[in-house]
């Protein structure tokens, strides 16, 4: 199992975490993250439906539960379009 922030997580969760971390302060758009999650199965010309957004949200919530002790959190903006890795204090601000 891959280790991120001193926490073991599945390969899929590590791939999602790595993509969000690599995106930096700008964040990664939800649709791009979905394509990484699905790999070749993702349809690049379509917007995400509610079910797909929920799958991605569940993965992010599970990653956040795993890294809670690290002081970091994957945060999504108001409209849910971009995911960023933030320190816990930055999320509250």
Image (cartoon, helix red, strand yellow):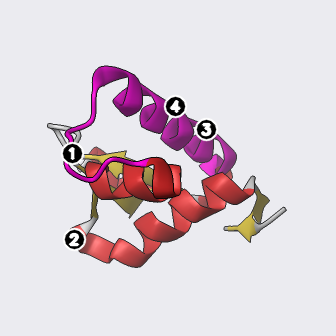
Residue 62 is marked as: 3
N-term mark: 3 or 1: 3
Image location of residue 35, percent across then percent down = 40, 55
- Pointer 2 and pointer 3: residues touching (CB < 8 Å)? no
| Vertical placement of residue 30 versus 32, above or below | above
Residue pictured at 28% horizontal, 50% vertical: 31
N-term mark: 4 or 2: 2
For the residue labelled by badge 1, is the local secondary structure a helix, a strand or a loop? loop
Residue count near mark 4 (Cα–Cα under 10 Å), binned few <14, some 14–19, many ≥20: few
For the residue labelled by badge 4, is the local secondary structure a helix, a strand or a loop? helix
Confirm whether the magenta stretch covers residue 67.
yes
> In which quarter of the view is residue 22 placed?
bottom left
Is residue 65 or residue 83 the one in the foreground? 83
Question: What is the C-alpha distance between the residues marked 4 and 3?
Answer: 6 Å
Which residue bears the numbered disc 4?
58
- Please state if 9 lies on the left or on the right of 64 as rendered: right
Residue pictured at 67% horizontal, 68% vertical: 5
| Vertical placement of residue 77 versus 16, above or below | above
Image location of residue 92, percent across then percent down = 30, 45
Which residue bears the numbered disc 2?
26
Which residue bears the numbered disc 1?
77
**Magenta highlight range:** 42-68
Confirm whether the magenta stretch covers residue 83.
no
Q: How many marks?
A: 4
- Pointer 4 and pointer 3: residues touching (CB < 8 Å)? yes
Residue count near mark 2 (Cα–Cα under 10 Å), binned few <14, some 14–19, many ≥20: few
Q: Is the stretch drawn in magenta largely helix, strand or loop?
A: helix
Question: What is the C-alpha distance between the residues marked 1 and 2?
Answer: 11 Å
- Pointer 4 and pointer 2: residues touching (CB < 8 Å)? no
């Amino acid at each position: 199992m891959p280790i991120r922030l001193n926490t073991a997580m599945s390969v899929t969760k590590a791939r999602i975490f790595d993509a969000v971390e690599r995106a930096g302060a700008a964040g990664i758009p939800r649709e791009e993250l979905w394509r990484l999650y699905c790999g070749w199965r993702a349809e690049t010309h379509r917007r995400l439906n509610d079910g797909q957004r929920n799958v991605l949200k569940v993965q992010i919530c599970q990653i956040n539960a795993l890294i809670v002790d690290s002081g970091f959190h994957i945060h999504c903006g108001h409209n849910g379009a971009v995911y960023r890795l933030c320190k816990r204090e930055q999320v509250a601000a």
